[in-house]
Image: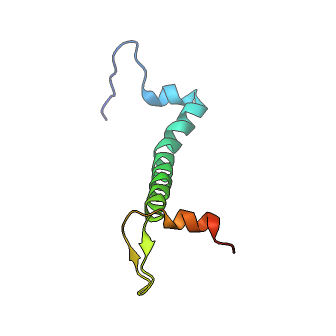
């Protein structure tokens, strides 16, 4: 068997985290939450970008371009 040697006065990270349950929980959840929030923010940004595109009235295709017609019709056309 091999013995684990450490420097004098230092403790392993596991013993540090053993006494601090909240820090251990934060370390466990931090990376997945970062990815979930990142994907959420990215999808909202892409949704905002596509809100400025317009629809060709003849072919009904969505055409990438900048127009405010979608927002104007949102507030002016009655349902």
* Residue 64 in picture, x, y percent from top left: 36, 69
Q: Is residue 33 above or below residue 9?
A: below
Q: Is residue 2 above or below residue 70?
A: above
Q: Residue furthest bottom?
A: 58
Considering depth in this image, is 58 or 35 the residue closer to the camera?
A: 58
Which residue sits furthest top? Answer: 9
Q: Which residue occupies 45% across, 45% down?
A: 31
Residue 56 or 5: which is nearer the viewer?
56
User: Quarter holding the N terminus?
Assistant: top left
Pick whichever, 31 or 39, lies toward us.
39
Asked whether, in this view, residue 6 is left or right of residue 31, the answer is left
Residue drawn at the location 58% of the way across and 68% of the way down: 73
Q: Quadrant of the C terminus?
A: bottom right
Q: Position of residue 58 (x, y in %)?
A: 42, 87
Q: Residue at x 50, y 25 (%)?
A: 16
* Colour option used: rainbow
Q: Residue at point 48% right, 52% down?
A: 41
Horizontally, residue 45 falls left or right of residue 77, namely left
The image quarter containing residue 19 is top right
Q: From this viewpoint, which residue is outermost toward the front? A: 76
- From the top left corner, tell me how far across and down residue 38 is, in percent: 46, 50
In the rendered view, tell whether residue 77 sits above or below residue 20.
below
Quadrant of the image occupied by residue 62: bottom left
Residue 35 point in image, percent of width and height: 45, 50
Q: Quadrant of residue 2?
A: top left
> Number of marks in the image?
0
Q: 50 and 54: which one is in front?
A: 54
Taking the view exactly as shown, the residue that stands out farthest to the right is 79
């Amino acid at each position: 068997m091999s013995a684990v040697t450490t420097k004098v006065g230092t403790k392993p990270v596991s013993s540090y985290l053993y006494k601090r349950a909240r820090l251990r929980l934060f370390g466990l959840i931090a990376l997945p939450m970062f990815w979930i929030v990142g994907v959420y923010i990215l999808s909202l940004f892409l949704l905002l970008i596509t809100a400025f595109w317009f629809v060709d009235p003849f072919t009904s295709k969505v055409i990438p371009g900048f127009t405010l017609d979608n927002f104007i019709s949102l507030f002016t056309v009655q349902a």
